[in-house]
Image (cartoon, helix red, strand yellow):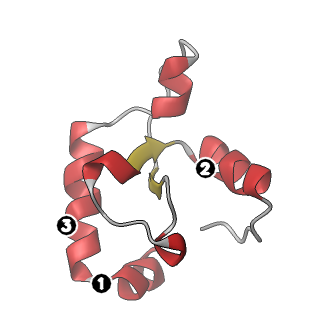
């Protein structure tokens, strides 16, 4: 599944994602709530399909639980992305 995601976004995304994750190793949403949880995914705040981009201001590192919650709150179809 992980490789499919990189294929979807391309090699540039993998580099951007890895660089962002190294700079932000903890879930940013959990940190705001005072919890220290390892980030597992990098999320686009404004989705690419809605005109978002890979800029750092549009990214946040999240644990899988927070990532799923954000997509559920948005009403997105969620398939462990």
Q: Picture coordinates of residue 9 (x, y %)? A: 37, 81
**Helix, strand or loop for disc 3:** helix
Residue at 69% from the left image edge and 56% from the top image edge: 71
Disc on the earlier residue, 3 or 1: 1
Q: Nearer the viewer, residue 33 or 3?
A: 33
Residue at 59% from the left image edge and 68% from the top image edge: 81
Residue at 32% from the left image edge and 46% from the top image edge: 57
Residue under numbered circle 1? 10
> What separation in Å lies between label 3 and label 1 (alpha carbons)?
9 Å
> What separation in Å lies between label 3 and label 2 (alpha carbons)?
20 Å
Circles 2, 1 touching at the beta carbon (< 8 Å): no
Residue under numbered circle 2? 67
Disc on the earlier residue, 3 or 2: 3
Q: Picture coordinates of residue 35 (x, y %)? A: 54, 17
The mark found on residue 25 in the picture is none
Q: Is residue 40 above or below residue 50?
A: above
Q: Is residue 49 above or below residue 63?
A: below
Disc on the earlier residue, 2 or 1: 1
Q: Nearer the viewer, residue 39 or 53?
A: 53
How many numbered badges does the structure rendering display? 3
**Helix, strand or loop for disc 1:** loop
**Helix, strand or loop for disc 2:** helix
Residue at 28% from the left image edge and 72% from the top image edge: 13
Residue under numbered circle 3? 15
Circles 3, 2 touching at the beta carbon (< 8 Å): no
Q: Picture coordinates of residue 67 (x, y %)? A: 60, 49
Q: Picture coordinates of residue 65 (x, y %)? A: 66, 44
């Amino acid at each position: 599944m992980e490789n499919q995601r990189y294929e979807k976004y391309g090699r540039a995304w993998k580099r951007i994602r890895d660089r962002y994750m190294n700079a932000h190793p903890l879930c940013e949403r959990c940190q705001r709530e005072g919890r220290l949880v390892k980030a597992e995914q990098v999320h686009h705040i404004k989705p690419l399909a809605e005109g978002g981009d890979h800029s750092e201001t549009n990214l946040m590192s999240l644990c899988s639980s927070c990532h799923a919650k954000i997509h559920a709150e948005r009403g997105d179809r969620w398939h462990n992305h």
